[in-house]
Image (cartoon, rainbow, N blue to C red):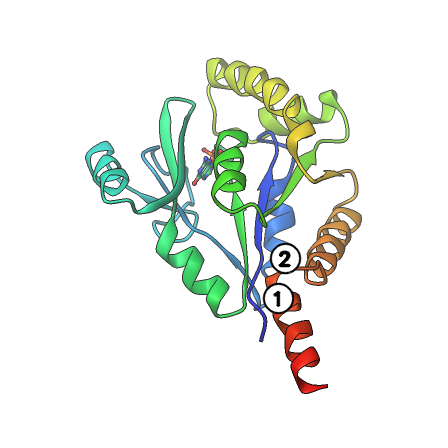
Amino acid sequence: MGKGRLIVISGPSGAGKGTICEELFKDENVVFSVSMTTRAPREGEVDGREYFFVTEKEFIENIENGGFLEHAQTFGNYYGTPKAAVLEQMELGRDVILDIDTKGARQVREIYPESVLIFVLPPSMEELKRRITGRGSEKEEDIKIRLGEAVHEMSLAVNYDYCIINDDLDEAVGAVKSIIAAEHHRYDEEMDAMIQRYKEEK
Ligand code: 5GP
C-alpha cells in the first residue's frame, strides 16, 4: 500500500471548501485533519469534529512542544494543524485533507514539498458576498473583515498547484477527486524504489 497524499485546500470563507470536503470524506481513504483553534465554537460545531477548541495557553504550549505541522493567526485567532495525526494517517495510506489558509499552506509546502495545494474560488464576487452574509453566524463588522480577507486570500491563489471554481458542487468535487487520483501517479520516491527493485530482479 502506498503512502497517503497530503492535500491542502484553501479558499476564502464562503467559497464552499467545507461542502466539497464533506463529499470527499465519503471515501474512507480520505480523512480530515482536525485543526486546533482558539476561536469560540459556532453553533452546531462539536469539539474534536470541526476543531479541537483550546485556550490560547494550550495552543502556545502545543507550539512550544513542536506539536504543529503549521500554525497561523487569522481573524485574531490561532489555528494549527496537529502534526502526529496527519503523519499517522498518511503512513496508513490515507490521503489527508487540510482545510487551512494561505499562510498555513505556504508553511506546509516548505516542510513537505510533495504536498498538493488546491485553491477553491467562488463563482463570482456577488455569490461570495451572498454566501458569507447568508451564513448568519457573523456580525456585520466580521463580514466586512472576512470579505477583505477573502480578496487578499484570492490574490494568493497564484501559489497553488490547482484552482477549482465552485460553481457546480458535483463538478467541483469531481475535479478535486481527479486531482487526487492523478497525484497518486506522480513520479516519487516510492516509484523510484520500485524501478530500482525491477532493475535488481532483471
Ligand atoms: P473558520 O474560523 O471559518 O473555521 O476558519 C477560518 C480560516 O482558518 C479558514 O480559511 C480556514 O481554512 C483556516 N484554518 C482552519 N484551520 C486551520 C489550521 O489548522 N491552520 C491554518 N493555517 N488555517 C486554518
The percent coordinates of residue 31 (x first, y second) are 52, 60
Q: Quadrant location of residue 60?
A: top left
* Residue 109 in picture, x, y percent from top left: 54, 40
Query: SS class of the residue under badge 1?
Result: loop
Give the residue drawn at x 65%, y 82%: 200
- Please determine whether, in this image, residue 148 is positioned above or below residue 77: above
Rendered image quadrant of residue 154:
top right
Residue 144 spot, x, y in % from top left: 54, 14
Q: Residue at x 35, y 31 (%)?
A: 78
Q: Which residue is mark 1?
A: 27
From the image, tell me which residue sits under label 2.
Answer: 24
C-beta proximity under 8 Å, tags 2 and 1? yes
- The one nearer the camera, 77 or 82, is 82
Residue most extreme to the bottom: 201
Q: Residues within 10 Å of mark 1 (few under 14, many from 20)?
A: few
- In the figure, residue 29 lies in which quadrant? bottom right
**Helix, strand or loop for disc 2:** helix
Q: Which mark is residue 149?
A: none
- Residue type for callout 1: Asp
Near-viewer residue (44 or 188): 188
Q: CA distance from mark 2 to mark 1?
A: 6 Å
The residue positioned 41% from the left and 53% from the top of the image is 49
Dividing the image into 4 quarters, which one contains the C terminus? Answer: bottom right
